[in-house]
Amino acid sequence: MTQRSQRLAPTLFVAAASLLVCEGFVPREVFVSFVPRSGTIRGRVELRRVAPPIERRPGVSDLGAPNPRDVADRLRSVVYLESAPRGAFESGQPGHAIMDQHNETFVPHVLAIMTGTTVDFPNSDNFYHNVFSLSKTAKFDLGRYAAGHSRSIVFDRPGIVRVFCEIHSHMNAFILVFSHPFFAMTDVDGRYRLDNVPPGTYNVVAWNEGTSSEPKPVTIPDGGIAEADFILR
Amino acid sequence: MKRTAVQLACLLVLCAAPAAARQLPSQPLAFDDGRVTIGGTVSATYGSDDTGFFNFTDYDRSELRMLRFDVTGAVNAGPHFAVLGELRTENFDAVRPYALYVRIHPWTSRDIDIQAGRVPPTFGAFARRTYGSDNPLIGYPLAYQYLTTMRADALPATADELLAKRGSGWLLRYSVGDNTPDRGLPLVSAFRWDTGVQAHARTANGAVSGTVAVTAGTVSNPLFNDDNGGRQVAGRLELRPTAGLIVGTSVARGAFLADAAARSASQSDGRAFAQTAWGADAEYSRGYYLLRFETIVSAWDLPIVRTPALTLPLRAASTSLEGRYKIVPGLYAAARVDHLGFSEIAGSTRTAEWDAPVTRTEVGAGYSIQRNLLVKVSWQRNRRDGGHVPNLDLGAAQVVFWF
């Protein structure tokens, strides 16, 4: 059986079962136990080396030392299915996310969202920021705006978006836009959990600060849990 | 031959930079957990032949035909002490230390810094943002670049001699002082930083900041080794009353004329012939536009040698208005209108400004191929009331890469 037909099998099974139940050939309660139950992929992404933060450019022409700033959290990775199960692209309600600008840092530093999600970029500093991206996935420039103000962008294409501030060149962030919901952020220890994945075999990828793992084939049993660990850098 | 080589190099960089930049660093190089950082800027400019010397910074260098490499570095030795420096080379000339100073931050809880060495300019707004990535156009404001007929090491004996040099600041010789032909000086030099000590303080919310400096040279003639024993005192006050608005005022006064030139003028009584400068600037930005205004008045006191005497002090005033508007992500349009005028002096046969007034209008656009790779084009209209080429329109293109 090919990988594609493996993935299609549960869907065809559900369709056939639904037909039989609707037509009254089989009592509904008999089939409930045969509907494939989604499973979970969990594991850990180990970072051999944490990506260094982007430093300020040497402020040789500044009349004084710059203000202290926060350093972006580069420990969190994103784990996602390279190819999603059928039906995964039938999106529900468009999502909403926030990427704050605080102490010359984007918070969070990495955002994973689905296409159609609106991301707000509030400015929580008492000086101007100018969020922009020249990424092919989403080219935008929100202009300069002050503390307490916010601008928004709808991300409608999948891909990786690098976000910067025009005024503070060390400020940077990543937005990973997926066309399906099968992705998860790790915690600071690298642990992740991808729930509600239909049974099947998928290629799973881990990503951190622009570095991706090789796709790892993972088989999820019916209603079960699959483990997948990754090592990056 | 060298000029051709530079032109070829500029053209090569203009063509090859977009491809090469993809392999080059996109952020400052950091070592030792960020305690040592190194940044850089490369700009290649190629433009029309500036036969009127409107954009020259000395006899050999035009800002419109320039290949410039800048390397900046900072070594942060704890929260109280840092060493900062910048090396620069232009058109494959010798590498020069553009800046080298120590920054002392005595209290971590207060925004007070003391900087000593070859320090950033205290006076004005533009001189600290001359880098290609900070300047939306290719040309510089006249006050910071245009070579007037004022020299610090030589002076005219009479008003007639000075009037005869109008519009030739790129190469001039006077009868008193150093007789070697050399360039004149701009009102404020953006191409050399002064040497001395600087103190900077800022309120906690950043709304008010002030800087004072004592340096060896003056704003138009920054020096590493003093040539007159006098010092310049400069100060700047900057207010940020609301987000996006910066208002600043600067003053500077210091001994300008070299001792050797004063002695040649039979003025060796120890009197300092000073340059006094005053400036005001404002910047306002919001959304997609940015506006900058700056005006500078400079006055030079010189010895009277013979009649018809110079009408002292010799004054010059510059006003520039600059705007930038972002059209779409990565693309902006910019313009600057700039005028430089001079006080009048009376010669034997005529009364006129001591140097030829200049008006420059520059319009241009910039496109970011990637975040740290910018391509600019601009067109300049220069009008001068004197000189061998009074009117000249110039076009230029520039590629700027920074990390």
Image (tube, helix red, strand yellow):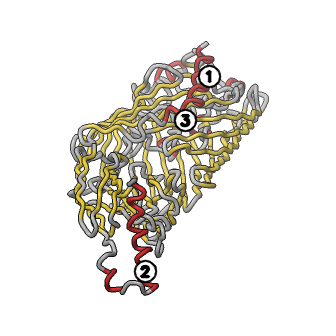
Q: What residue type is labelled 1?
A: Gln
Mark 2 residue crowding within 10 angstroms, few (<14) / some (14–19) / many (20+): some
Percent position of residue B253, x then y: 47, 40
- In terms of secondary structure, where does tag 2 sit? helix
Q: Which amino acid does label 2 sit on?
A: Leu
In the image, B150 versus A206, the foreground residue is: A206
Report whether mark 3 lies on the same chain as mark 1.
yes
Visible residue check, residue B280 = yes
Marks 1 and 2: which is nearer the front? 2
Q: Quadrant of residue B354?
A: top right
In the image, A55 versus B1, the foreground residue is: A55
- In terms of secondary structure, where does tag 3 sit? helix
Percent position of residue B180, x then y: 57, 15
Q: Mark 2 points at which residue?
A: A20
Looking at the figure, which quarter contains the C terminus of chain B? top left
Assess whether mark 2 and mark 1 are in contact (beta carbons under 8 angstroms).
no
In the image, A158 versus A170, the foreground residue is: A158
- Vertical placement of residue B399 versus B161, above or below: below
Q: Residue B7: which disc?
A: 1
- Vertical placement of residue B297 versus A92, above or below: above
Percent position of residue B362, x then y: 68, 43
Q: What residue type is labelled 3?
A: Pro
Q: Mark 3 points at which residue?
A: B18
Marks 3 and 2: which is nearer the front? 2
Mark 1 residue crowding within 10 angstroms, few (<14) / some (14–19) / many (20+): many
Mark 3 residue crowding within 10 angstroms, few (<14) / some (14–19) / many (20+): some
Tell which subunit mark 3 falls on.
B
Q: In which quarter of the image is residue B214?
A: top left
Marks 3/2: CA distance?
A: 62 Å
Marks 3/1: CA distance?
A: 18 Å
